[in-house]
Every structure is written in structure tokens, then in C-alpha cells.
Image (spheres, rainbow, N blue to C red):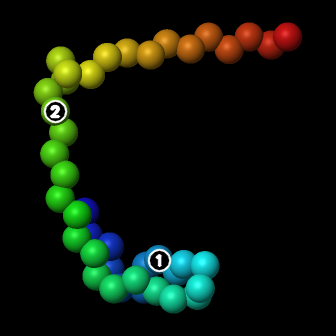
């Protein structure tokens, strides 16, 4: 992921320089499922 200069402004009104991040994902079998039921009261 690349974030170009000036894309982020912080609380002090300063902008970022170029940022580069590298990340990897794991195999699908390494993840699980979460099911949530929402009921109206």
C-alpha cells in the first residue's frame, strides 16, 4: 500500500510524507468465522 504525500493531515495540521507499507495475508484455513445475530428489543 502506498500513501502519497499530503494524503493525511494530523491534529497539528501537518501532512504526511510518502509512506509505503508491505503486508501479507495468511491462508484461508488460518481464519475462522464469526456470526452475530442482532435482534430488535
Mark 1 — residue? 8
The answer to whether residue 32 is left or right of residue 22 is right
Q: Residue at x 18, y 18 (%)?
A: 29
The answer to whether residue 21 is left or right of residue 8 is left
Q: Image quarter for residue 27?
A: top left
The answer to whether residue 21 is left or right of residue 5 is left
Q: Tell me which numbered mark, 1 or 2, is placed earlier along the sequence.
A: 1
Q: Residue at x 85, y 10 (%)?
A: 41
Position of 25 relative to 16 (above/below): above
Circle 1 — which element? loop
User: Could you say where residue 11 lies in the image, as x and y percent from the top left?
Assistant: 60, 79
Q: Disc number at residue 30?
A: none
User: Could you say where residue 12 lies in the image, as x and y percent from the top left?
Assistant: 59, 85
Mark 2 — residue? 26
Q: Residue at x 47, y 77 (%)?
A: 8
Position of 19 relative to 30 (above/below): below
- Name the residue at the front extreme: 12
Amino acid at each position: 500500500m502506498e500513501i502519497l504525500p499530503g494524503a493525511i493531515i494530523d491534529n497539528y495540521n501537518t501532512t504526511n510524507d510518502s509512506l509505503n507499507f508491505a503486508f501479507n495475508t495468511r491462508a484461508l484455513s488460518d481464519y475462522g468465522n464469526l456470526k452475530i445475530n442482532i435482534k430488535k428489543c
